[in-house]
């Protein structure tokens, strides 16, 4: 087993990984940028190495600096977390060439699945259903011809894409040239690669993905699905397992396809096969594979009882994964909400500042993965996710209730959050009926913030006012002639 692991990441996932290491008796090395000197991940690790300026490009994306930190600290393995360099095949290759272990799949698997167009071709060869579409198009005529054959609406995607960037829905043939041009520019700007692909756009689709897990001895299983259809701008907000849509037969078909897909690229460690699911036909299609741990892995952990990060470390060290597919069976229902420092009333704009209060909910079946504490500062340099709130209960109905209660208990002051928005989604009948497609937030859900101050704010102001009165009160006088009774005040707070 490894003695020391460098965590090439920050925030909640770095904290999650270092906790797993601590349980396993492995020392941890964190890396931190200028903006993260006081951050939880840097302070909780056994050692911390400074790697540069606040911007990700000058710190968490600097492969050389990260590798150097691993070597100089004497780490024997590197965990990339998610985001940053986690799906960068050349970083994985660099780590392996330096005789350290990359806690993830091989560089070759990352490369094979890294490109949407190429991975689709490989999946077709492996007999995994893919969305009807076309890759490798050059001229606008080729785009037009292919789009006509597929039929509108179509989706234009960047081959090198990720994070929902460079994606455009085209409803009408007349708009195609313009949208292709725009998508090309966006792809070039975001990924330095202007190659595009097009595919049939499935309007009321659900996003259902399968966790796969393999060891270095050729054994690979799936750990069931996650439904991630509550999205905004193709970015997930709420994830759950099991999916309210899947029948046991569909689950088996999709799970088998996921295992075939991963095996086709000789996959080991944790990965996710994403499918788009069309409820009108019950057809499912491969979207892409994420060759890393996902943000939403905790829902799978709670229902399977497996610690995925610890298993990632173990299989990276060469241990076999001991469970056969038939031995795995999930229990209960788990939901995750991503709590963001952003303002839903203001176009979901990120909100920055000092966390004056940060009180996480607690209780049976409630888990919070966060990288912040009260007093920490949320900056604009990184993703604005504050925490992941995850609940586990007997069934979906009780899990929804538990999540609603936990969200109400979550207190964050100092930045604006999406907590009210998440609560509204939780209590919406479409959500409880499992009818939420990937476009639902944008098309069905007109989130209008209340114009009144929140209940929390009213309570806080009232209590402040009463306590100011109490300071003036003489001990022992508590009757209707009490001059300091809150009901006798003549200042503005009386009403
Ligand atoms: P990215 O890598 O940028 O996240 P994906 O290919 O994984 O892009 O797609 C992200 C999201 O976009 C999916 O979860 C889904 O909501 C939507 N999407 C992608 N392809 C299609 C499609 N063919 N039809 C409908 N929605 C799609």
Image (spheres, rainbow, N blue to C red):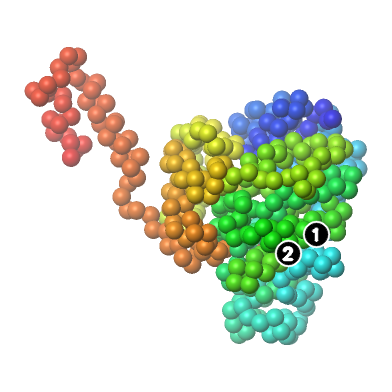
First in sequence: mark 2 vs mark 1: 1
Q: Quadrant of ligand 1?
A: bottom right
Label drawn at residue 286: 2
- Please tell me in which quadrant of the rendered image residue 316 appears: top right
- Please tell me in which quadrant of the rendered image residue 144 appears: bottom right
Dot 2: few (<14), some (14–19), or many (≥20) neighbours within 10 Å?
A: many
Which quadrant is home to the C terminus? top left
Q: Is residue 160 visible?
A: no
Q: Nearer the viewer, residue 309 or 77?
A: 309
Residue 193 percent across, percent down from the top left: 76, 65
Residue 241 percent across, percent down from the top left: 61, 50
Query: Alpha-carbon distance for marks 2 and 1?
Result: 9 Å
Q: Residue furthest left?
A: 481
Q: Is residue 170 left or right of residue 419?
A: right
The residue identified by callout 1 is 261
Q: Nearer the viewer, residue 491 or 286?
A: 286
Q: Nearer the viewer, residue 398 or 201?
A: 398
């Amino acid at each position: 087993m490894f003695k020391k692991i460098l965590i090439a990441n920050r925030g909640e996932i770095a904290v999650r990984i270092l906790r797993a290491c601590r349980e396993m008796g492995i020392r941890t090395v964190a890396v931190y940028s200028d903006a993260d000197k006081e951050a939880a991940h840097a302070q909780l690790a056994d050692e911390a190495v400074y790697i540069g300026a606040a911007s990700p490009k000058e710190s968490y994306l600097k492969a050389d600096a990260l590798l150097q930190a691993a070597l100089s600290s004497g780490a024997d393995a590197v965990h990339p977390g998610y985001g940053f360099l986690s799906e960068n095949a050349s970083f994985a290759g660099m780590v392996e060439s330096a005789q350290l272990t990359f806690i993830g799949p091989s560089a070759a698997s990352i490369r094979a699945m890294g490109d949407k167009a190429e991975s689709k071709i490989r999946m077709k060869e492996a007999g995994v259903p893919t969305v009807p579409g076309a890759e490798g198009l050059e001229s606008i005529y080729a785009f037009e011809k292919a789009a006509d054959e597929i039929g509108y609406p179509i989706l234009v995607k960047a081959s090198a894409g990720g994070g929902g960037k460079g994606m455009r829905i085209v409803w009408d043939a007349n708009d195609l040239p313009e949208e292709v041009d725009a998508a090309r520019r966006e792809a070039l700007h975001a990924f330095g690669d202007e190659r595009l692909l097009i595919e049939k756009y499935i309007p009321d689709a659900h996003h259902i993905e399968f966790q796969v897990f393999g060891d270095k001895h050729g054994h690979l299983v799936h750990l069931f699905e996650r439904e991630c259809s509550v999205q905004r701008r193709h970015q997930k907000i709420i994830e759950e397992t099991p999916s309210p849509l899947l029948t046991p037969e569909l689950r088996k078909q999709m799970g088998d396809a996921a295992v075939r897909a991963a095996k086709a690229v000789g996959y080991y460690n944790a990965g996710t096969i994403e499918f788009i699911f069309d409820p009108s036909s019950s057809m499912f299609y491969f979207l892409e594979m994420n060759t890393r741990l996902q943000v939403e892995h905790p829902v799978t952990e709670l229902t399977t009882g497996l610690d995925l990060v610890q298993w990632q470390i173990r299989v990276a060290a060469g241990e076999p994964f001991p469970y056969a597919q038939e031995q795995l069976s999930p229990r209960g229902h788990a939901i995750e909400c991503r709590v963001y420092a952003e303002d839903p009333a203001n176009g979901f704009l990120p909100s920055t500042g000092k966390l004056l209060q940060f009180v996480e909910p607690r209780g049976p079946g409630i888990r919070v993965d966060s990288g912040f504490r009260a007093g920490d500062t949320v900056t604009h340099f990184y993703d604005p996710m504050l925490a992941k709130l995850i609940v586990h209960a007997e069934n979906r109905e009780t899990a929804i209730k538990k999540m609603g209660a936990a969200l109400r208990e979550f207190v964050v002051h100092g930045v604006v959050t999406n907590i009210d928005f998440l609560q509204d989604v939780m209590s919406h009948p479409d959500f409880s009926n499992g009818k939420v497609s990937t476009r639902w937030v944008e098309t069905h859900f007109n989130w209008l913030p209340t114009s009144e101050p929140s209940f929390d704010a009213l309570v806080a102001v009232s209590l402040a006012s009463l306590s100011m009165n109490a300071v003036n009160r003489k001990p022992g006088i508590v009757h209707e002639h009490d001059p300091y009774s809150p009901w006798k005040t003549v200042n503005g707070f009386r009403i």
